[in-house]
Image: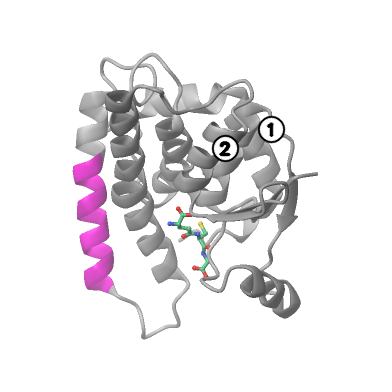
Amino acid sequence: MTLTVYLHPMSSFCQKVLIALYESGAAFEPVIVDLGNETSRGDFLKIWPIGKFPVLRDEARDRLVPESSIIIEYLALHHPGRSALMSADAETARDIRLLDRFYDHYVSEPMQKIVGDRLRPAGQRDAFGVAAARAGLNTAYALIDAQMATRTWALGADFTMADCSAAPALFYAEKVQPFRGQYPNIAAYFDRLQQRPSYARVLCEAEPYLKIFPEE
Ligand SMILES: N[C@@H](CCC(=O)N[C@@H](CS)C(=O)NCC(=O)O)C(=O)O
């Protein structure tokens, strides 16, 4: 098999790429990286010393591709399958990238900050940073809710890379700072995402691992 993806099923950025792979139908071999296991972590660091997943290896092209958005763009170019998730039109592609960046930077990052803080040793928590992350999430929620009042998917009618970013970001964001109740358009959008077969499959595969999520 030419495509190998180094990932963990619970990781939001890996789920983003998995949604893209299931949308396209591209064949790939998943390699689960367990960062808590010295051997698994060491093997992964030899491949990508930055140590963050997902990472794609395309054997046929002899390319190593890190970073979730870059992987999805790479797949769209070389392994589009059923659904490319990017647009050939430069203006539309830029709009997709903007929304993708928005969900990564303004939903995923603050969500990860809040989750990461729960994993810190007692006495080393960052209350100031968490409060800033919560404020940032609220600002992002208000913007998304207004956008989604008139859209089916993040960009509009078509399911794109931005929806791949949105689904896992919103899933974990809802756990740390619920949007249901206050933001009905985000809730309705997230319901649509959960019904999308690609994301439903990703959620099903992540389910056995969710028990290790640090609830608080
Ligand atoms: N910008 C990266 C972020 C990837 C990322 O943050 N991955 C997390 C998992 S969701 C990770 O590898 N965490 C492990 C660590 O930081 O040690 C991308 O888009 O792929």
Q: Which residue is pictured at 65% across the width and 74% down the height? A: 46
Image height of 50 relative to 135, above or below: below
Numbered label attached to residue 86: none
Numbered label attached to residue 26: 1
Residue type, numbered disc 2: Leu
Quick one: quadrant of the N terminus?
top right
Residue 184 in sight from this viewpoint? no
Indicate which disc, 2 or 1, sits on the residue closer to the N terminus. Answer: 1
Image height of 32 relative to 96, above or below: below
> Which residue reaches farthest bottom?
123
In which quarter of the view is residue 154 placed?
top left
Residue type, numbered disc 1: Ala
Q: Main secondary structure of the magenta part?
A: helix
The span shown in magenta is 127-140
- Spatial CA distance of label 2 from label 1 is 8 Å
> How would you rate the neighbour count of disc 1 (Cα within 10 Å): few for under 14, some for 14-19, many for 20 or more?
some
* 47 left or right, relative to 88: right
Q: What residue is shown with label 2? A: 75
Residue 129 in sight from this viewpoint? yes
Of 27 and 212, which appears nearest the observer?
Answer: 27
Give the image location of residue 10, x and y in percent. 60, 52
Q: Which residue is pictured at 46% across the width and 22% down the height? A: 159
Q: Is residue 134 magenta?
A: yes
